[in-house]
Amino acid sequence: MQTVLDLFSSVRILDIVDIMIVSFVFYKLLLLIKGTRAEQLIKGLLIILVVSKLSDIAKLYAVYFILDNTMKLGFIALLIVFQPELRRALEYIGRNKFLQKDYIANKKREMQNVFHEIVETVSFLSKKSIGALIVLEKKTGLGDYIETGIKLDAEISSELLISIFYDKTPLHDGATIISNNRIVAANTYLPLSTNNEVSQELGTRHRAGIGLSEVSDALVIIVSEETGSISVVNEGKLTRYIDDKKLMNILFNEFKVKEKKKSSFWFNWKQGVKND
């Protein structure tokens, strides 16, 4: 116990700051390479590194010699292969998103634009009596349901959403899932509610929306194909026959960007990590 206490007593505040900075940099680098070629290449390099160390321990001199020299020459190759990712990283640092003083204001404008596109879409579909099922992810991940559909990863626009739900397109039958202000998938399948108290007059879209709300905290917007009415399912509660204004208010209340009096680097950094 004394050894442990001595160890902790020798840790300086600067050491903690140092570790936090390194962890933050590695976290941001992982976010930058996620979903790119670099992610697979780094996995391959880690495998080569592990095999190299194992060959050294096992005294496989020929294998170790080849892998060791490959790793030495690999640094130059990495600069060439990772050129797009390195450029993207430098551009990200140049934008300095997590240090901007107006981060909250920018986030609010971004959310407002997203909500405007969604409400405009729902309003158009409602007037044309085109059925739609739009899911907005919150804290509970919807990866299992995203896998059942067609992955898109597209910017949100009313034109794109309307074209997805147009009944002549192959993606209209199913739910479209939105996560982190991106359309991540379309034509996904949601679990139908098994609650016997759900009204029998509700169709498949409403039952799917309620079913998803029973197993996650997602907010679901439904446009009825029969009546064109707009409904919202949130926290297991179905609200029917809402208008554009009420839908906008619901979206702002559920996904509002919280403001705090703090404006320090630490607060902005936490907000950046939370929203990435």
Image: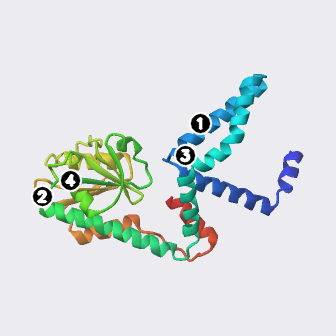
Q: Nearer the viewer, residue 180 or 252?
A: 180
Vertical position of residue 37 compared to residue 97: above or below: above
Residue 165: give x, y in percent of width and height: 20, 53
Residue 270: give x, y in percent of width and height: 58, 64
Residue 37 seen by the camera: yes
Which one is earlier in the sequence, the residue at label 3 or at label 4? 3
Q: Which mark is residue 2?
A: none
Q: Nearer the viewer, mark 1 or mark 2?
A: 1
Dot 2 corresponds to which residue? 129
Residue 228: give x, y in percent of width and height: 13, 59
Q: Nearer the viewer, mark 2 or mark 3?
A: 3
How far apart marks 1 and 4 lie (CA) works out to 41 Å
Asked if marks 3 and 4 touch (Cβ < 8 Å), the reply is no
Which one is earlier in the sequence, the residue at label 4 or at label 2? 2
Dot 1 falls on a residue whose secondary structure is helix
Q: Which mark is residue 44?
A: 1
Inspect the image, locate mark 1, and give the three-letter code of the amino acid beneath it.
Answer: Gly
Q: Which mark is residue 165?
A: 4
